[in-house]
């Protein structure tokens, strides 16, 4: 799921959960953060982990023996491979704890194998919308901070005469 | 994070995830039309114009990973449509806005979903989506959600990026004006505020 | 599509107000202490309730009643029927203070005693203060004799020229309802007519919601009540500090903050000066939209009336606004004792508290994102932070502080008259 024009991507995967591991995984997800371990991966725009319920029954289908899945989904700057490496390095213990409940997870000490495992279960989006595709996480955060600084500066200087303004301008925070 | 759709401030980014079974012919139709639609600015512009979607994805799922490492993936008896969105604002209003203002686009995605009531009346489409939202309520599936800029709404992010893009020119003009004197500098700042007032 | 509401079963204060002739109001908050006696009281009261049937002659006073969910429970409505009510009503306003932004000094722990947690709200309108006060005494005595305690009483009175305490003419804009017999006569070409089901249960609404079939709910409406104390001096100080001593500049600033001049002239129709001769015509005062003023140069994008009712600002046909309309029935109140401030006893009716009142409060007034204003609040939101931008060739940024303080309130349900009798019957009355 690549946003056109910039180096930003997404990764989503449906990961099979071991039958005996469902209650433990449920408890772990409910207790995870704040702060979220994903905060350590600064290139993360959004991330979610969701323990999917048994799938809704279709009219003609039979859903016995369908394993429950953990949905892992993230939007980030850079490549999916690079993100997986960051995940293994920066939230290794949490990743081991979470994905360790899933069938076939190789463990964060083997990031290449983790990448291969995630890519095996990868979902591809056929249709996507990106509200602000042209910016990295760092750029968004910096811009939001600058905006707050500009607003505060504008409020603080609204009654300033030009000489006073010129003195305060020299100390503008976004410089 | 506890599911609490009604309790959060409107600026906070939130997730909605739903997965619904669709008719097999509809899955084929989506695969075909998405090749065009996903590249169509015209189709996307209306949906993005509401300015509360950070990211949204639609995926087709027709097999699930096996329960044992070496087993083959399980072919599902019917395909499923997985919808994930990161948005800000009121969830019901989000869904209803789509139904009221983008009805044929909604139809073009969801029509083949089982039990899809159509975009109109809007209240039924809102119920269709929100009852199936896995983060709940009323569902209560365990989940964890992270937003890299939690109170940065789509509109404020876009405004902030526009402001940031205008800063180099402001700095350039301010540096020139400062050489002339404080009144010239104040004029530059005033012009910047006037130009950027919709982003402040 | 012709919709005709059942006026004989509808309480009269919902779709159509009683007019300026009924200038004195009373809100009596009661607590049920004895179910059976209270149910008998309700049975008697239901015979006095003012319906929506037009009067050949105006009565001396009007009486209406509404209940919190706790109140219906106390009156003996079975849990199974109570669970059919929506979560917002069941929880009550205090529990939803987070959503409403009722924090800090507006938080429930600072509310006046008796204003949250009541069971029954009796609303009275009278033509004179004496008549109102006499009726208050009779109602209180009757309630006390039937196992109900008066936990709070609020008197209200219309001010001159339909103003509220900040000096602005109020009650100009109300929804135009698609039943000419039911709604107030403010229909103008610019006003989008709204189906009655947006305000009264049991009728089609704009979203095609399933029609309410529960006998307790048909012809009922949810009533939100909030006592809003107004810092009139603080607002005057803001105008003075921002606009200086020049009264015309102060009036312009006040108009920019609100979206109308104090006499009701909408900025969209007259951005430079009020038009007192025309402002008295409600049709003229409501005949405008914002679609041609996207940059806010006539009426600021964050102005109070533009936030509370965006009209065609969000989409040209006004469809995105139609699902969030409320019918306002508030009245000003004077301070009851030395040191108190005056205020507005705000009350509104709608078919869905969450979709209508709460959405307007939380998403349009407490926050500005829907209009591209970031987290900027409405000038009367009660928040003590934020700013307002007055758009123009030389924009102004006005730091805001709180001019309104919530003293308490709750969510009530105003049943139809047949439902009232059924509630009384369920309680043994």
Image (cartoon, rainbow, N blue to C red):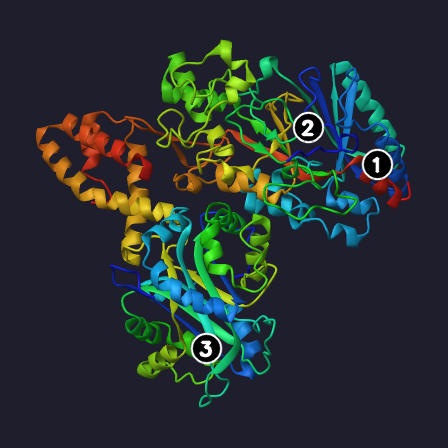
- Answer whether labels 1 and 2 touch (C-beta < 8 Å): no
Give me the C-alpha separation between circle 3 and circle 2: 57 Å
Camera-side residue: B146 or B82?
B82
Most extreme residue toward the top is C277
The label number, if any, that marks residue A15 in the structure image? 3
**Is residue C196 something that shows in the picture?**
yes
Question: Taking C279 as reference, is B59 above or below it?
Answer: below
Parent chain of label 1: C
Indicate the position of residue C245 as horizontal and vertical percent values.
Answer: 38, 13
Q: Earlier in the sequence, mark 1 or mark 2?
A: 1
Residue A67 appears in which quarter of the rendering?
bottom right
For the residues tagged 1 and 3, is the chain the same? no
Tell me which residue sits at (25%, 27%) in the image. Answer: A160
Q: Quadrant of residue C89?
A: top right
Residue placed most toward the observer, B143 or B154: B154
Query: How crowded is the residue under tag 3: few (<14 C-alpha within 10 Å), some, or many (20+)?
Result: many
Report which residue position mark 2 lands on: C182
Q: Residue at x 81, y 40 (%)?
A: C419
The answer to whether residue A37 shows anywhere in this view is no
Name the element at disc 1: strand
Question: Which of the two marks, 1 or 3, is nearer to us in this view?
Answer: 3
Residue carrying label 1: C148
Q: What residue is drawn where x is 48% and y is 78%?
A: B64
Say left or right for C74 vs C94.
right
Chain at numbered mark 3 = A
Chain letter belonging to callout 2: C
In the rendering, at what x and y percent does residue B69 appear?
A: 45, 88
Q: Is B52 located above or below residue C232 in the figure?
A: below
Q: Quadrant of the N terminus of chain C?
A: top right
**Horizontal placement of B41 versus B114: left or right?**
left
């Amino acid at each position: 799921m690549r946003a056109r024009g910039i180096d930003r991507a997404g990764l989503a995967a449906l990961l099979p959960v071991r039958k005996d591991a469902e209650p433990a995984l449920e408890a772990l997800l409910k207790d995870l953060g704040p702060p979220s371990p994903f905060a350590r991966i600064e290139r993360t725009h959004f991330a979610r982990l969701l323990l999917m319920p048994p799938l809704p029954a279709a009219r003609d289908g039979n859903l016995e023996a369908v394993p429950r899945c953990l949905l892992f989904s993230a939007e980030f700057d850079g490549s999916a491979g690079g993100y997986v490496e960051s995940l293994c390095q920066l939230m290794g213990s949490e990743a081991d704890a979470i994905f360790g409940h899933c069938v076939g997870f190789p463990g964060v000490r083997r990031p290449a194998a983790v990448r291969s495992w995630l890519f095996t279960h990868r979902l591809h989006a056929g249709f996507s919308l990106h509200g602000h595709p042209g910016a990295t996480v760092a750029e968004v955060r910096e811009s939001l901070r600058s905006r707050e600084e500009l607003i505060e500066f504008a409020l603080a200087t609204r009654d300033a005469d030009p000489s006073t303004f010129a003195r305060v301008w020299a100390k503008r925070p976004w410089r | 994070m506890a599911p609490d759709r009604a309790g959060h401030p409107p600026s906070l980014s939130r997730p909605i995830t739903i997965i619904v079974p669709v008719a097999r012919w509809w899955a084929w139709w989506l695969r075909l039309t998405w090749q065009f639609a996903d590249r169509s600015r015209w189709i996307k512009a209306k949906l993005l114009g509401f300015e509360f979607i950070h990211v949204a994805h639609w995926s087709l799922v027709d097999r699930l990973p096996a329960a044992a490492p070496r087993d083959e993936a399980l072919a599902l008896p019917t395909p499923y449509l997985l919808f994930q969105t990161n948005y800000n604002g009121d969830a019901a209003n989000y869904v209803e806005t789509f139904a009221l203002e983008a009805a044929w686009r909604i139809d073009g995605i969801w029509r083949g979903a089982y039990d899809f009531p159509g975009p109109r009346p809007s209240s039924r489409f809102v119920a269709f989506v929100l009852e199936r939202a896995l983060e709940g309520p009323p569902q209560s599936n365990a989940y964890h959600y992270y937003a890299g800029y939690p109170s940065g709404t789509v509109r404020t992010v876009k405004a902030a990026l526009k402001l940031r893009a205008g800063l180099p020119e402001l700095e350039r003009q301010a540096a020139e004006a400062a050489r002339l004197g404080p009144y010239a500098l104040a004029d530059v700042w005033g012009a910047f505020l006037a130009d950027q007032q919709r982003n402040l | 599509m012709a919709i005709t509401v059942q006026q004989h079963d509808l309480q009269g204060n919902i779709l159509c107000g009683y007019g300026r002739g009924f200038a004195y109001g009373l809100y009596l908050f009661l607590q049920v202490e004895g179910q059976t006696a209270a149910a008998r009281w309700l049975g008697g009261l239901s015979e006095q309730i003012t319906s929506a049937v037009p009067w050949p002659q105006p009565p001396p006073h009007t009486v209406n009643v509404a209940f919190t969910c706790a109140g219906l429970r106390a009156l003996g409505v079975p849990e199974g029927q109570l669970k059919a009510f929506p979560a917002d009503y069941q929880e009550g306003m205090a529990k939803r203070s987070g959503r409403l932004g009722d924090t800090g000094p507006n938080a429930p722990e600072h509310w006046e005693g008796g204003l949250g947690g009541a069971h029954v709200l009796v609303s009275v309108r009278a033509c004179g203060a004496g008549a109102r006060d006499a009726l208050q005494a009779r109602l209180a005595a009757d309630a006390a004799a039937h196992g109900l305690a008066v936990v709070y009483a609020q008197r209200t009175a219309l001010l001159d020229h339909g103003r509220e305490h900040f000096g602005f003419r109020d009650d100009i804009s109300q929804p135009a309802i698609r039943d000419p017999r039911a709604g107030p006569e403010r229909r103008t070409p610019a006003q989008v007519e709204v189906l009655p089901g947006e305000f009264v249960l049991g009728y089609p609404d704009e979203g095609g919601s399933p029609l309410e079939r529960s006998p307790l709910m048909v012809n009922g409406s949810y009533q939100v009540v909030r006592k809003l104390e107004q810092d009139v001096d603080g607002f005057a100080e803001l105008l003075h500090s921002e606009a200086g001593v020049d009264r015309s500049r102060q009036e312009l600033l006040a108009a920019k903050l609100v979206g109308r001049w104090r006499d009701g002239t909408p900025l969209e129709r007259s951005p430079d000066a009020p038009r007192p001769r025309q402002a008295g015509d409600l049709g003229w005062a409501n005949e405008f939209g914002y679609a041609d003023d996207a940059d806010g140069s006539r009426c600021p994008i964050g102005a109070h009336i533009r936030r509370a009712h965006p009209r065609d600002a969000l989409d040209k046909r006004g469809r995105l606004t139609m699902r969030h309309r409320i019918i306002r029935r508030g009245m000003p109140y004077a301070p009851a004792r030395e040191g108190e401030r005056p205020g507005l006893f705000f009350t509104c009716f709608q078919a869905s508290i969450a979709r209508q009142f709460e959405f307007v409060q939380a998403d349009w007034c407490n926050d500005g994102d829907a209009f591209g204003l970031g987290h900027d609040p409405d000038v009367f939101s009660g928040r003590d932070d934020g700013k307002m931008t007055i758009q123009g060739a030389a924009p102004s940024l006005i730091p805001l502080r709180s001019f309104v303080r919530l003293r308490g309130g709750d969510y009530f349900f105003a049943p139809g008259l047949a439902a009232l009798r059924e509630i009384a019957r369920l309680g043994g009355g």
